Amino acid sequence: MSDKKIPYKIYLEENEMPKAWYNVRADMKNKPAPLLNPGTHEPMKPEELAPVFCEELIKQEMDNDTAYFDIPQEILDYYKTFRPSPLVRAYNLEKKLGTPAKIYYKFEGNNTSGSHKLNSAIAQAYYAKKQGLKGVTTETGAGQWGTALSMACAYFGLDCKVYMVKVSYEQKPFRREVMRTYGAQVTPSPSETTQIGKKILAEYPGTTGSLGCAISEAVEVATSTEGYRYVLGSVLNQVLLHQSVIGLETKAALDKYDIKPDIIIGCAGGGSNLGGLISPFMGEKLRGEADYRIIAVEPSSCPSFTRGKYAYDFCDTGMVCPLAKMYTLGSGFIPAPNHAGGLRYHGMSSILSQLYDDGYMEAVSVPQVKVFEAAEEFARVEGILPAPESSHAIRVAIDEALKCKETGEEKTIVFGLTGTGYFDMVAYEKFHDGKMDDYVPTDEELEKYISKLPKID
């Protein structure tokens, strides 16, 4: 450890901000499996993806070998409005826990979207504008991605159509209004505005929706509307590429003070923030240069890693998207209406799924009430009200710090604080009123959907 005095917040200078995104696939011995055409089960070709995604994003999606992609100057100029983001030492939390562990968190909530999602939203909007498109469609769970994309589209003068998971649309009306303030059209999903939405509502009357449902609707609108493409806030390789700025900045800040983390923790829904946070550390691990314990944290109500199957599956409930090999609960799985809307996805990033299957990282699922207990404990001593998604990482960071208290080990723990929870007060209200439950699907319930996975030779 260096003799340098470590400040409460470690800020990087503007010239220390990453100028290129890091593609962890370049260092993976076992590359993530390719997307498959749902009809032929053959690997998707760029021309087959062109009606859905922007051209430049397709190139990024399919490139497993280029280690670094230069960040266009226009994107860097926008990044500078909220990046570099601080790496914070949680001194007060350490004191409260009485742990010898050193706890750091990378705070991504210091922009209007309130989360890390803006890192990829501005990139995807930039490429859509560069291609000459009129607008984009997307889905959103908790609303952070939809908010970020609406901001990015407003910046570049693009139309933005957002399908928001119905339970979040109802629980988080103010998040919805922020999107509308930035010019987005927001529709609760599943809806009567698409053929797939109508089909899902007919099959599951009164459903609270899922990210898989919302993806289906957004893709249908994009592919049937001239001048539009679909953009996604998580799961895809291109998204993890853009989010690598989180991990690159985190590592640069730690290196500045000669700090080496022992444990790196991130919440996991589709994989965007976790993949971004761990990317340079995982690269070192893959190259045999260093070792880290990396933990993915997911909700017990939607346990893709811990109880899902590693197999090819549809990325959406309507089964119109390509097939991806990932840890999945089945595209038809609609999780209980928990309050971590951004983690209510049936599958996981193909990159993270491959890394997990190869044993490079761990995964744990945690119940909702325990998550909010950790969120409240963190808020009271660190002064930031965390998003429910981020609070999954806080829960496990606290648990690991308490283990250090028992053993006396002085481990260094780093976790991702992906965003703020100021639009999640309905969730906090239910927690405080004792009305929050911990629904966990049974093995029989999960098998109902896993048994219907596509049969791929």
Image (spheres, rainbow, N blue to C red):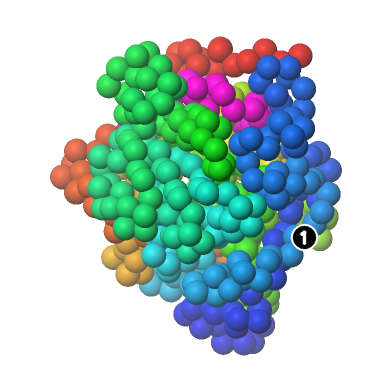
Q: Residue at x 61, y 23 (%)?
A: 313
In this rendering, the answer to whether 110 lies above or below 443 is below
Left or right of 368 on screen, residue 15: right
Residue 8 highlighted magenta (yes or no): no
Depth check: give the residue in front, 83 or 370: 83
In this rendering, the answer to whether 220 lies above or below 87 is above
What secondary structure do most residues of the magenta stretch adopt?
Answer: loop
Q: Residues within 10 Å of mark 1 (few under 14, many from 20)?
A: some
In this rendering, the answer to whether 210 lies above or below 95 is above
Residue 319 highlighted magenta (yes or no): yes
Q: Residue at x 83, y 49 (%)?
A: 65
> Residue 17 at x, y = what percent?
64, 74
- Which residue has dot 1 on it? 68
> Residue 226 at x, y = what percent?
54, 38
Left or right of 351 on screen, residue 226: left
> Residue 420 at x, y = what percent?
37, 60
Q: Is residue 211 visible?
A: yes
Q: Residue at x 48, y 64 (%)?
A: 155
Left or right of 320 on screen, residue 107: left
Q: Quadrant of the N terminus?
A: bottom right
Q: Residue at x 51, y 83 (%)?
A: 7
Q: Please state the extent of the stretch shown in magenta in the rendering.
A: 316-337
Depth check: give the residue in front, 387 or 21: 21
Q: Is residue 424 visible?
A: no
Q: Quadrant of the C terminus?
A: top right
**Amino acid under label 1?**
Tyr
Q: Residue furthest bottom?
A: 4
Q: Residue furthest left?
A: 433
Depth check: give the residue in front, 322 or 345: 322
